[in-house]
Amino acid sequence: MLTRLKVSGFKNLVDVDVRFGPFTCVAGANGVGKSNLFDAINFLSALADRPLIDAALAIRDEGGRTTDVRSLFHRVGDTYADQMSFDAEMIVPYEGVDDLGQQAKASITFLRYALILGYRADENSRSLGSLEIVKEELSHINLGEAKENLLFPHNPAWRKSAVRGQRRVPFFISTEGKGIKRIIKLFQNGGSGSKPLSRLAINLPRTVLSASNAAESPTTLLARREMQSWRLLQLEPSSLRRPDEFTAPTRLGTDGSHLAATLHHLARLNNGHRINGNSAAEAAAQIYGQVANRLAELIDDVHAIWIDRDERRELLTLQVTNRDGTSHPARALSDGTLRFLALTVLELDPHAKGLLCLEEPENGIHPERIPAMLRLLQDIATDVQEEVSSDNPLRQVIVNTHSPTVVGQIPDDSLLVAELKETVQDERHFKRVSFSCLPDTWRQSAPEGINPVSKGKLIAYLNPIIPTETKSEFNEVDEKLTQTKLLLPSAHRVIDRPDLQMLIPFPQNIE
């Protein structure tokens, strides 16, 4: 679970410092940099799994693909930054396995990973340039500091079940020296009793964390596993519609592939054993029933969902049956229905953990049914009022949007507003993305401070169509509202806030 991310020098992310809760919605206009935040998260995930150059090439640039790693660095005019830096605070799983199937247990589960990458021109790399590691560190956050670092409202029982272990030695990975003599050290088994493994940074084709295993440093391995689980979901209708072979993977792909195989696997997960007094067939029916009930929140005419097994062709096909008994295969379902189904399956999958990023979840959803989609996304995330368990996995959701309907319906303490801010650095003027929260929500209490978004910036979301002649009136209202403190507790939706009611021209009866 990613609880805080600091980024600088990556695309238009300069001195960005964002805290995340279980569910976060980032709202902003097109082109301000919402997707760049997702790209930064995706880049860190790729760096935990691949060589530096492969991870860089996996991240899109402004044209939709990366052909030069230089394009990932912040640019002002024709001048690029020399370095990009990342600092991620995260809660990692307590147990896991490495690439060879060896078991690992973390000595402590609340960690901070810092990485600085520099650009190095290289004539032998087809003009792509290359990346070098300037700094790589993995350290722990003490249990006693967990409460002050986890600012979102939560039950202490959840925190104690998620943040475990203890640690005295500060680093699992550290960096020493400068230039060509820079060395990155991996502390074996996370302790100080054994000699650390030292590697010259200039020769490293990948991060030290990405090559970790259970024998050398179990905690580092589990940090790697956590970062590998950060996924950007780009649910493609063609992938969602495709039937699966019997031998297909049983985990939903980031593009929505293997939907049928994943649901079929969840329905048969009990492997013939009786669970809670139910037979395997009854347990499977219960899973299908849960999916059907959830889909009924989006579509009225849903009676059942099931998987058709074609024994001759060895294919699995997802089917939805209407109340009149007519069945429709996945290929006949709408894009929005398929996206909703995929997220429903993710919610039920106990093995689907980590961070899920989703762009514009409202796509293909009727405005009247968007609240159902938002409820589903919040249910996917871990419930911080209950202890972490197989029924409440450590799972997190971040979405971005520019939809007024989405912004108005989400809990107000889950909202971040992205906007471009004029900045001067080294006598150069440029615009960078900035993330603001609503007043009197938990992010504003952060020690580093975060500016609340002005009410005027929310007008576009609360009133999608505003005549030009009335904008000055709203600006006057905004100045008056910034001096008031008529706020309700943070459990309310954005549109429920009294300090925003004056900006809404019509009564809000959206449920």
Image (cartoon, rainbow, N blue to C red):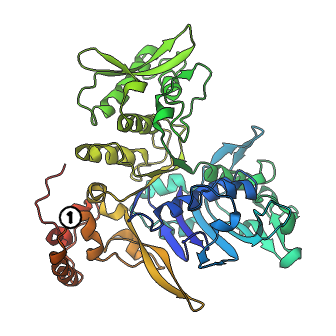
In the image: residue 113, left or right of residue 457 = right
**Whole-percent x and y of residue 367?**
25, 47
- Most foreground residue, 122 or 352: 122
Seen at 15% across and 80% down, the residue is: 473
In the image: residue 262, left or right of residue 318 = right
- Please, what secondary structure does the residue beneath circle 1 have? loop
Q: Is residue 440 above or below residue 370?
A: below
Callout count: 1
In the image: residue 447, left or right of residue 188 = left
**Whole-percent x and y of residue 149?**
51, 69
Q: Quadrant of residue 480?
A: bottom left
Residue at the far left: name it. Answer: 507
In the image: residue 310, left or right of residue 119 = left
Residue at the far top: name it. Answer: 312
Q: Is residue 156 above or below residue 119?
A: above
**Whole-percent x and y of residue 101?**
75, 37
**Whole-percent x and y of residue 273?**
52, 17
Query: Please, what is the three-letter code of the amino acid marked with disc 1?
Result: Ile
Question: Pointer 1: what residue?
Answer: 465
Seen at 51% across and 46% down, the residue is: 233
